[in-house]
Each structure stands twice: as C-alpha cells, then as structure tokens.
Image (cartoon, rainbow, N blue to C red):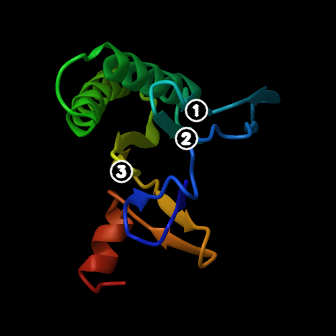
Amino acid sequence: MYNDGESGRCSPEHEKKPEPFDGAECFTTKKDALVCEDAFINSPEAGLFGVADGVGGSHRGDLASNLATSVLMSSFTQNQTGSVKEKLEDAAKACAEAFKQISNVQGSNTTLSAVAIERTGDTFELHIAHIGDSRAYCFRKDSQTLDRLTHDDGYLELLVKASIL
C-alpha cells in the first residue's frame, strides 16, 4: 500500500483505489510433495487484503492458513454493521477463535496479517489486524521507505522488548 507520508493515511493523489496484489505463489516441500502453506485475501471490492503463513513443520499449516483467511473474509464481508475498523476487529476475533479450535484438534498453526481500507473523504485509512509473528509494513512511495506498522506477537519479540535479547 502506498502512503503519502502521513502515518496510516493514503492520499488519493497517490492512490486512486486499493490496488490488488500482482499475485503470489509459494510452495514448501513436505514428504516429497509440493504443499502451499500460505493463503491470501485479495479483495479490492471489500477493501480487504491479507496473508496467512501456515507454520512449516506443524501438522497441516496449509489447513490453518486457509481457514484463517476464509473465516476472516466471510466474517468481514457478512458484517453489515459498524465501522470498517469494528468489522475487522470482529472478523479477527472470529478468525482467532476458529484458529484456536483447529489448533487444538489438528495441531495446525498459522500467522495472519490483514489490512482493511476505509475511504474517508479524500484519504484512505488503513486498519490492521495480525496474529502471531507476522508483520505489516507500509511502503512510502514519496520517500521510498518501508515502515514497520506492527510488532510480533511471539515469544522472541517479548524477549527483545524486555531487553533480554
């Protein structure tokens, strides 16, 4: 997402509408088979974009990432009340709950980063949800800089914040 320099807001001069991702593919080798453990949300119509990264080495990371993105997308688009921010918060909660249930049953795991875009007047406001050790960044076209918008929800980040590492 391009940003005009003001944190969290995108100017329509730089961005006429949310641009879709160009597309992405990923494969990891698991028991001599190609398995994609990542899932994507690319919905300019809903203003919702995201990626879930199934945890490699855990059982069925592909199942967890697909569940996370499908629950997030369906919950977000079916919610007809509240602001975009509230819709994203509710969808992230629904996703986390579904994610917890499948993790307990299947032992699968994933991270998730998502952004919902809300147009307010002449600007676009970004609302971010993330679960796990994935991060969201903003690329600023004017200054060619990449800014980290979120912090990991993982153990390593806690150690760094506590100045242990």
The amino acid beneath tag 1 is Phe
The residue located at (53%, 39%) in the rendering is 51
Q: Residue at x 22, y 29 (%)?
A: 90
Sequence-earlier tag: 2 or 1: 2
Q: Is residue 106 visible?
A: no
Q: Quadrant of residue 164?
A: bottom left
Q: Which badge, 3 or 1, is on the more N-terminal residue?
A: 1
What residue type is disc 3 on?
Glu
Residue pointed to by mark 3: 125
Quadrant where the C terminus sits is bottom left
Q: Residues within 10 Å of mark 1 (few under 14, many from 20)?
A: many
Residue lying at 28% horizontally and 86% vertically, measured from the top left: 163
Residue under numbered circle 1: 40
Residue denoted by label 2: 17
Label 2: state its secondary structure: loop
Dot 3 or dot 2, earlier in sequence: 2
Q: Is residue 21 left or right of residue 68?
A: right
Q: Label 3 neighbourhood size at 10 Å, few (<14), some (14-19), many (20+)?
A: many
- The spot of residue 129 in percent (x, y) is 34, 45
Pinpoint residue 1: horizontal percent, then vertical percent: 55, 53
The kind of residue on which mark 2 rests is: Lys
| 30 relative to 86 in the view: left or right | right
In the displayed image of the protein, which residue is found farthest to the left?
82
Residue 130 in the image: above or below residue 152 = above
Q: Nearer the viewer, residue 113 or 35?
A: 113
Q: Is residue 60 left or right of residue 119?
A: right
In the orientation shown, which residue stands out farthest toward the top? Answer: 78
As measured in the structure, the alpha-carbon distance from the residue carrying label 2 to the one carrying label 1 is: 19 Å
| C-alpha gap between disc 3 and disc 2 | 12 Å
Does the residue at mark 3 contact the one at mark 2 (Cβ under 8 Å)? Answer: no
